[in-house]
Amino acid sequence: MGKAIVLDGKAVAARVRAEVKTRAAEFARSRGRPPGLAVVKVGSDPASAVYVRNKRLACEEAGIKSFAFDLPDSVSREALVAQVKALNADPLVDGILVQLPLPKGLDANEIMDLVDPAKDVDGFHPYNTGLLAQKRPRLRPCTPFGVIRLAHEYGITLQGLRATVVGASNIVGRPMALELMLAGATVTVCHTRTRDLQAEVERAEIVVAAVGKPGMVRGEWIRPGAAVFDVGINRTAAGRLVGDVEYDAAAERAGWITPVPGGIGPMTIAMLLSNTLDAAVARS
Ligand code: NAD
């Protein structure tokens, strides 16, 4: 096997969840109610169903009350808007998560913009993204926040390092770049128009891959000793989960690397729980 230290996201996530559980119990004792997270699922996308179930189970295990709303594919824009507004107004709900993607015909941006920023535990509202961009983060997008926490737990100092983020989506790549800048890294962001992806990855001491294409980041591109965070989750024809990085070859060169599964995935859920606690405390 490779020389890299494998970053055990599952173990670190378990520690974060245990911290949240202690804080949730303390919150419940002092406020007379548990912190609450509303998880809204619209439609019948099978991947969303798995994510939502895992998030609800993780909540219950951490002592966070989970409020489940399962709306049909056919739900009207008006009914979904009314649901989000009702959750904004509900004092028992500290966090609101609307699982993406939404079925065709519903505008995810419109719905995200409606979520009260104080309850936006996914950190997707433009207000929270804006605060992160301005170096005063409040509720931070869970996946990039999970990468930062994992690096921190392993003592990987980001300050001054050259970081390359592959992928520029609103939910992963862009906020990842903002997080890395906040941590003091010098950041390059790659996307479909990037001319020479290999060169951008080769220079990087920190690589974050968030594309959604297996093997997109080649092992031989990894700079010796680099820290590699693989956010991608792809299912192979054989049904196996793999990331965006050519793992075995990358692990021969990297200093640290996250596995898929068991890397960033569990960290994402842990940071969602942590955000919910932060939101609950800030609101009460
Ligand atoms: P997306 O499809 O919204 O964005 C993909 C990005 O990759 C785009 O910015 C695109 O420009 C870029 N890209 C595509 N082809 C490229 C290429 N050839 N070279 C350089 N850039 C290229 O995807 P997303 O929502 O950001 O998710 C990315 C991956 O991360 C997916 O596999 C997704 O399943 C996974 N994901 C994992 C977690 C987790 O908890 N681990 C959370 C969210 C997403």
Image (cartoon, rainbow, N blue to C red):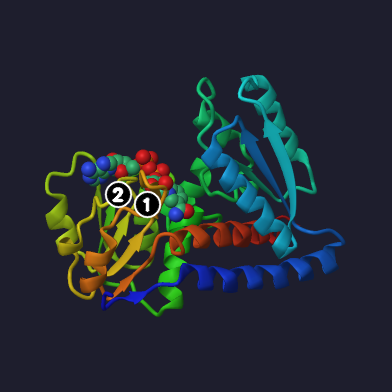
Q: Quadrant of the C terminus?
A: bottom right
Callout 1: CB less than 8 Å from ligand 1: yes
Q: Nearer the viewer, residue 58 or 277?
A: 58
Which mark sits nearer the N-terminus, 2 or 1? 2
In the rendered image, which residue does mark 2 sit on?
A: 214
Q: Quadrant of ligand 1?
A: top left
Q: Quadrant of the N terminus?
A: bottom left
Locate residue 145, reporting x and y percent: 47, 60
Q: Closer to the camera: disc 2 or disc 1? A: 2
In the rendered image, which residue does mark 1 sit on?
A: 232
Left or right: 165 with respect to 144?
left
Left or right: 253 with respect to 101?
left
Left or right: 153 with respect to 16?
left
Residue type at mark 2 is Pro
- The furthest residue to the front: 238
Locate residue 41, reporting x and y percent: 63, 37
Residue 203 seen from this side? no
Residue type at mark 1 is Gly
Residue at 40%, 52% (x, y): give it.
Answer: 240
Query: Residue 84 lies in what quarter of the image?
Result: top right
Tell me the number on the disc at residue 244. none
